[in-house]
Image: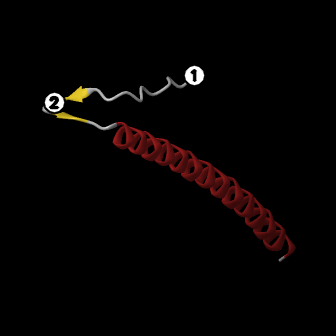
Amino acid sequence: MTPKPDYTAVPKGANTMLLYEDLARARMREAEQAASTLRLVRRLTAAKRWNRVSNWAAKRATRMASSL
């Protein structure tokens, strides 16, 4: 379970982050995390597809070689 972000203005070093800046950074982190997850899903899908193509090509090559 993802911890809920704290949207209060908290002193961070010498500067205090304003509420809208904190919200904007939280949204950016969430968007980056979603994009990272989507990239992983796309890579896994592509890997499965290429594996199927590879298996199909290997079977076809075997059939062609045995017919010679």
Residue linked to disc 1: 1
Q: Residue at x 67, y 61 (%)?
A: 50
Q: In this orientation, which residue lies closer to the viewer: 6 or 65?
A: 6
Residue 27, horizontal then vertical, whole percent: 47, 44
Q: Secondary structure at mark 1?
A: loop
Q: Residue at x 55, y 45 (%)?
A: 34
Q: Secondary structure at mark 2?
A: loop
Residue 29, horizontal then vertical, whole percent: 43, 42
> Which mark lies nearer to you, 1 or 2?
2
Q: In this orientation, which residue lies closer to the viewer: 45 or 33?
A: 33
Residue 58, horizontal then vertical, whole percent: 74, 63
Q: Residue at x 78, y 72 (%)?
A: 65
Q: Which amino acid type is marked by label 2? A: Gly
Q: Along the polypeptide, which appears first: circle 1 or circle 2? A: 1
**Does 64 sit left or right of 43 as displayed?**
right
Q: Which amino acid type is marked by label 1? A: Met
Q: Residue furthest bottom?
A: 68
Does residue 52 lie above or below 30 as drawn? Answer: below
Query: How many C-alpha atoms fall within 10 Å of the one at disc 1: few (<14), some, or many (≥20)?
Result: few
Q: In this orientation, which residue lies closer to the viewer: 47 or 4?
A: 4
> Residue 11 appears in which quarter of the rendering?
top left
Residue 5, horizontal then vertical, whole percent: 45, 28
Does residue 38 lie above or below 1 as drawn? Answer: below
Q: Residue at x 69, y 56 (%)?
A: 51
> Residue 55 appears in which quarter of the rendering?
bottom right
Label drawn at residue 13: 2
Cα distance between the residues tagged 1 and 2: 29 Å
